Every structure is written in C-alpha cells, then in structure tokens.
C-alpha cells in the first residue's frame, strides 16, 4: 500500500517475518507487529523499552507523551505492556496518521490519542505535571528537528512531567567526537540533573553513524547495565554527565544544524 502524505510517498509493506514496515520516500520509519505489539524490531526502540521497563513496572498504567508518531509502534508497545495507559502522540503529518490507521488499525480503547501538531507547538497545550514519560522520536528528512533538543524544549518537558518522570530522546550521530549528542547530553544534564546515554560501543566511539538514546530525570535512574548486557546486540550505558563532558548546552538563540543520516543509512 502507498499514499502521498505531507512528508512524501508513504509505503506500508508486509515483511517476511509477518511484521509491517513503513517507509516515507524510501526512508525506513517504523516496523509494527500487529500480532504482538510488544515485539520491537528496531534496536533503538528496544532500548527505549528497556528504559521504560527500568523506570515503570509492566502492567502498571502510565501516562506518556510521544513527540513523533509514524506507525505508532511505541504507543502500541506501551498499550500492550501497560494496559489502561493514557497516551498522547504529537504527529504533524495528519495524512500519514490517517494512512497508518487505515492500513495498521489501532485497537479500540487503546488509550492512544493523536494530535496533528508539531512537538514544540503541541507540548505547550499539555498540562503541567501530567505525564510520567516523554518520548522524543521525531525526524524531518532523516534529521532531528533542532527545536526539540534545546534547553527551552527541555524546560517544557520538565513542566509536563511529574516529579519522578523521565524524558527519553532518540538521537542520531556519527560525527567526529559526537559533538551533537554531547551537546544534547549537556543540555539535559543541566536541566534535569540525572540521566544516561545508551548506544552501541562503535557509535559512542564515533566509528559508526547510529542511534543514541538519552534518558533524563530529576531523580537518579535505575541501573540499566544488566539490560544492556542482555540485549542483542548488546549496548553500552554512560552517565549523561560523562558523555556531556565540557560540552555547552543548546539554546533556541543559537543557530545550529542537527546531523543528517548519510544516504542509505535508514533504507
């Protein structure tokens, strides 16, 4: 199935393993297992799942704000592993959301509400102290929007999160010294005070372009090293402060460009 959406040509096709893959203009966006939504095919999503499992027990309903929707893989995961959870998804491409809902229906009463707005505009309408987790997994043309990684946006995340809440960011980098990810880590460290970074060793060492998950909270996070060792492939966990080093936080006032994945990385 395919349809022209705001972001380009969206295609949903069945994979050999029975899951469904969403691509937009050829770029891999999401993979969904309708038979078992708790099955996360993407490695970076499994790491986000590890963070969720560490901070919030399964079967316990939680409130989640998702910045970025695509095929709603992570909202489906939360709805399955934590029934009765309340979830808001901010996804500006309403045509894409309609296409996904038609091709990959979301179960009724899943507790997932999608709002057709950007993350920065939409979070302003979310109540103070109303969510347990904010998950930022948004891309425009294979790059993270710059206005979702500044100290001003981090302040908005802090505003909507409950005192023990966690903000989780899916970032990409592979530049020398991971300059971008280090500056985001410095931003979250300065605003939240605690957190961790999750990635494969080769990504942390700047030898490969890939995903880096940053998790931040006002309170120390539970230990994630056990989950990291058991994962396939395994990944490493660094404290936000260690990753940030002497990097300077990002702000709205500073013009900067976020890394774009090299051609073919997510295809």
Image (cartoon, rainbow, N blue to C red):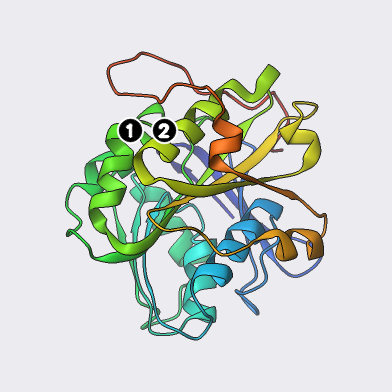
When the figure is inspected, residue 256 is found, relative to residue 137, above or below; the finding is: above
Residue under the image location 53 percent in, 81 percent down: 58
Q: Nearer the viewer, residue 87 or 196?
A: 196
In percent of width and height, residue 204 lies at 72, 34
In percent of width and height, residue 146 lies at 40, 27
Q: Which image quarter holds the N terminus? A: bottom right
- Residue 175 visible in the current orientation: no
Location of mark 1 (residue)? 151
- Residue 246 visible in the current orientation: yes
Q: Secondary structure at mark 2?
A: helix
In the rendered view, does 6 fall on the left or right side of 260? left
Q: Answer few, some or many: residues within 10 Å of disc 1's Cα (few below 14, many 20 plus, some between 14 and 19).
A: many
Residue 190 tag number: none
Q: Quadrant of residue 228?
A: bottom right
Dot 2 or dot 1, earlier in sequence = 1
Residue under the image location 40 percent in, 81 percent down: 61
Q: Secondary structure at mark 1?
A: helix
Location of mark 2 (residue)? 187
Q: How many marks?
A: 2
Q: Pointers 2 and 1 in contact (CB under 8 A)? A: yes
Residue under the image location 74 percent in, 26 percent down: 206
When the figure is inspected, residue 108 is found, relative to residue 69, above or below; the finding is: below
Q: Quadrant of residue 156?
A: top left
Residue under the image location 62 percent in, 74 percent down: 38
When the figure is inspected, residue 230 is found, relative to residue 247, above or below; the finding is: below
In the rendered view, does 131 fall on the left or right side of 16? left
Q: Answer few, some or many: residues within 10 Å of disc 2's Cα (few below 14, many 20 plus, some between 14 and 19).
A: many
Q: Which image quarter holds the C terminus? A: top right
Q: Nearer the viewer, residue 167 or 34?
A: 167
In percent of width and height, residue 5 lies at 43, 42
Q: CA distance from mark 2 to mark 1?
A: 6 Å
């Amino acid at each position: 199935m395919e349809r022209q959406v705001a972001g380009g040509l969206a295609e949903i096709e069945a994979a050999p393993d029975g899951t469904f893959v969403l691509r937009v203009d050829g770029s891999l966006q999401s993979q969904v297992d309708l038979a078992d939504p708790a099955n996360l095919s993407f490695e970076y999503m499994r790491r986000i799942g590890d963070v969720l499992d560490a901070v919030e027990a399964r079967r316990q309903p939680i409130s989640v704000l998702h910045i970025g929707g695509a095929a709603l893989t992570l909202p489906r995961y939360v709805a399955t592993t934590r029934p009765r959870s309340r979830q808001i998804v901010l996804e500006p491409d309403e045509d894409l959301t309609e296409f996904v809902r038609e091709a990959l229906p979301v179960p009724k009463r899943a507790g997932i509400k999608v709002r057709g707005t950007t993350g920065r505009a939409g979070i302003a309408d979310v109540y103070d102290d109303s969510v347990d987790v904010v998950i930022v997994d948004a891309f425009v043309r294979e790059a993270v929007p710059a206005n979702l990684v500044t100290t001003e946006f981090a302040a908005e995340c802090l505003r909507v999160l409950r005192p023990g809440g966690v903000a989780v960011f899916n970032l990409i980098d592979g530049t020398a010294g991971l300059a971008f990810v280090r500056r985001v880590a410095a931003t979250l460290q300065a605003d939240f005070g605690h957190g961790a970074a999750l990635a494969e060793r080769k990504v942390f060492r700047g030898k490969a372009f890939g995903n880096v998950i940053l998790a931040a909270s006002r309170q120390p996070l539970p230990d994630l090293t056990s989950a990291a060792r058991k994962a396939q492939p395994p990944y490493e966990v660094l404290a936000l402060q260690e990753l940030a080093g002497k990097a300077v936080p990002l702000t709205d006032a500073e013009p900067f460009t976020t890394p774009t994945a090299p051609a073919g990385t997510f295809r």
